[in-house]
Amino acid sequence: MPAAVISMVLPLMLLLSSCSSSGAGPITSIFSFGDSIADTGNHCYLLFKAGKRANNCFLPYGETFFRRPTGRSCDGRLIIDFIAEYLGLPLLPPYFGGSPDNFHGGVNFAVGTATALHTDFLTSKLDVKITTTNVSLGVQLDLFKQLLPSLCGDGIQTGCRHLFSKSLFILGEIGGNDYNLPLTDGHGFNDDIQQLVPLVVGYIGFVLREIIELGAVNILVPGNFPIGCLPFYLTKFRNSSSMNYDPSTGCLTRLNKLSKYHNELLQAELSSTRQLYPDVNIIYVDYYNAVFRIYQAPEQFGFTGETWKACCEGEGSVQCGSPSVKPCDDSSKYVNWDGLHFTEATYGSVARSILEEGLFMHPSFNLSSSSRIARDSGDYFPNSF
Ligand SMILES: *[C@@H]1O[C@H](CO)[C@@H](O)[C@H](O)[C@H]1NC(C)=O
Ligand SMILES: *[C@@H]1O[C@H](CO)[C@@H](O)[C@H](O)[C@H]1NC(C)=O
Ligand SMILES: *[C@@H]1O[C@H](CO)[C@@H](O)[C@H](O)[C@H]1NC(C)=O
């Protein structure tokens, strides 16, 4: 190699290596917190134990991939399943009904219907009937802490730090249900919901710092989806005035603005937390735009079904899983599965863009090497490059 080239390459390599954290290397376990977007069986387990049922605990949920219901709110795999597959890890076992012996590759605390804020707090804050699980984000964190002695071996301090240096934490999506509660309780859209956003985001930030203090060094924090594109809300808030809709997608503008507001505050929260912990990989995952681009050009992504309709949906409400509702013939053509949740096809598309193309992560992050990709840190390079 000519000397001139070496002298240009060397500083570049130094910059690149200084970008990756000390924990860089293959991921050997995943710990997940959240709601139905990531729940791999917790909510259904809790319901069955309480003698209750929810539609997503029955077929046709699971029909596409598992050929049986697994408690996932989807016809097949979730984003978290694609991440586990990509990392060569077992699909993440749900915490409830599981045994620590099975948690070597990690464990999933996400519970369908979970809120970020504690349910007692939401009850006092909102004039709504709480219909969600009480296993909110803080409760999930407590369960995680209780599990540490059996997870970490070798003493909590050193054992956990060693384990978590090779672990991926996924904190979310969470918070969507805090807004769904008042939105679906007949309150419609009002300023009270907007005022929840800083509280929800502040709480996510608190839990983020807690898991960092416990030793987490690789953390994905997904934002909220464009909820104004969900068939459930498109039906509920149907309005003849075109000014309520985004012309490029037909999605409800006000609801999407709520998601964007949440995501903006969340990114600010992550940014200030990064300053406290510069060596920790705190990665915002832009679920909003990963899905929104599909709504802008569905055919380009293979979705030829109507985007405002769910593959499996009763008239106007989430009834997939009840005997009277028959799903569409080919769920891979539909963006949405049951009115509130996406199809495996959509989750797969989002996961591929994140994992294979390295898109929609800020800063860019390579999950297979668990190191930041220098591309995003372009500002650090001298102009001469
Ligand atoms: C959640 O509800 C269950 C059943 O109603 C109850 O046993 C449990 O103590 C509650 N947990 C919390 C953290 O409030
Ligand atoms: C439809 O939207 C307009 C403009 O936002 C609003 O004034 C009107 O009340 C809405 N109509 C219904 C039926 O919700
Ligand atoms: C991530 O790193 C692996 C191995 O180091 C490499 O093969 C892959 O192309 C990288 N992926 C991205 C999206 O940069």
Image (cartoon, rainbow, N blue to C red):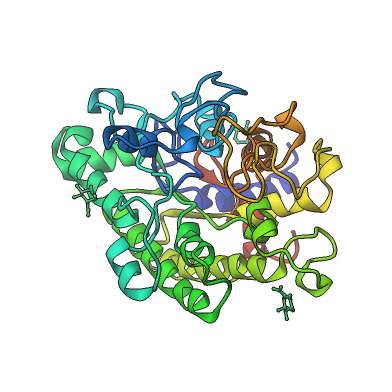
Left or right of 350: which side holds 263? left
Residue 86 x, y percent position in the rendering: 56, 29
**Numbered-mark total:** 0
Q: Is residue 80 placed above or below 65 in the rendered structure? A: below
User: Can the viewer see residue 182 in this picture?
Assistant: yes
Describe residue 45's horizontal placement relative to residue 78 as left or right.
Answer: left
| Residue drawn at the location 30% of the way across and 28% of the way down | 103
Whether residue 208 is situated above or below residue 69 in the rendered picture:
below
The answer to whether residue 30 is visible is no
Residue 213 position in % (x across, y down): 27, 56
> Which quadrant would the N terminus be assigned to in this image?
top right
Q: Residue at left 71%, top 42%?
A: 335
The structure residue drawn at horizontal position 84% and vertical position 49%, both measured from the top left corner, is: 297
Front residue of 228 and 351: 228
Q: Report the front residue among 378 and 314.
A: 314
x, y percent for residue 282: 47, 55
Could you tell me which residue is drawn at 33 percent across and 68 percent down? Answer: 123
Q: Is residue 21 above or below residue 328?
A: below
Q: In the depicted view, which residue is nearer to us: 164 or 199?
A: 199
Position of the C terminus by quadrant:
bottom right
Residue sitting farthest toward the top: 67
Residue 267 rendering spot, x and y as whole percentages: 53, 66
* Residue 200, picture quadrant: bottom left
149 and 336: which is toward the camera: 336
